[in-house]
Image: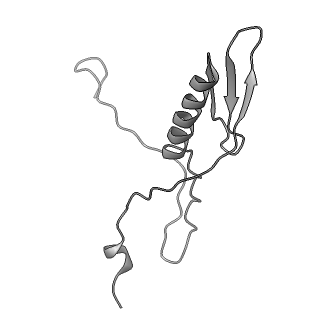
Amino acid sequence: MHDAAATTRPFTLQLAVTLTAVIHPEPDAGGFSAEVPALPGCYTQGETLEEVQANLKEAAEVWLAFRPRPRRAAPRRGRGMKPVSGKRMCRLAAAPGKYPP
């Protein structure tokens, strides 16, 4: 059997995805605002329907490329691991002559 970690390589996968967007007319401000409900935080706006549709496509592409990743859980303490105090130590260099040695 071979080491899977040594042969695993990242790659880019391109897919055609169909998403539903909601476009809202903005009568007071003029133009349109839009959102993609399946992509939390994916919003945009435009002066015309064509502009807002183009902006939606770009916003969804950017959201999918840089979407928030779920945080990984901290590793559990296992056999052979030392307990951690939670303290952090930091040594700072002082300007010469300012503080006693």
Q: Is residue 76 above or below residue 39?
A: below
The furthest residue to the front: 50
- On the rendered structure, is 7 left or right of 39? left
The furthest residue to the top: 28
Q: Image quarter for residue 95?
A: top left
Q: Is residue 26 above or below residue 7?
A: above
In front here: 37 or 57?
Answer: 57
Q: What residue is drawn where x is 74% and y is 16%?
A: 26
In front here: 46 or 44?
Answer: 46
Q: Is residue 92 above or below residue 95?
A: below
User: In which quadrant of the rendered image does the C terminus lie?
Assistant: top left
Q: In the rendering, at what x and y percent does residue 99 appear?
A: 31, 21
In front here: 30 or 43?
Answer: 30
Circle count = 0
Q: In the rendering, at what x and y percent does residue 85 appear?
A: 54, 54
In front here: 13 or 23?
Answer: 23
User: In which quadrant of the rendered image does the N terminus lie?
Assistant: bottom left
Q: In the rendering, at what x and y percent does residue 56 appear?
A: 59, 33
Q: What residue is drawn where x is 51% and y is 34%?
A: 58
Q: Image quarter for residue 97?
A: top left
Q: Is residue 27 above or below residue 55?
A: above
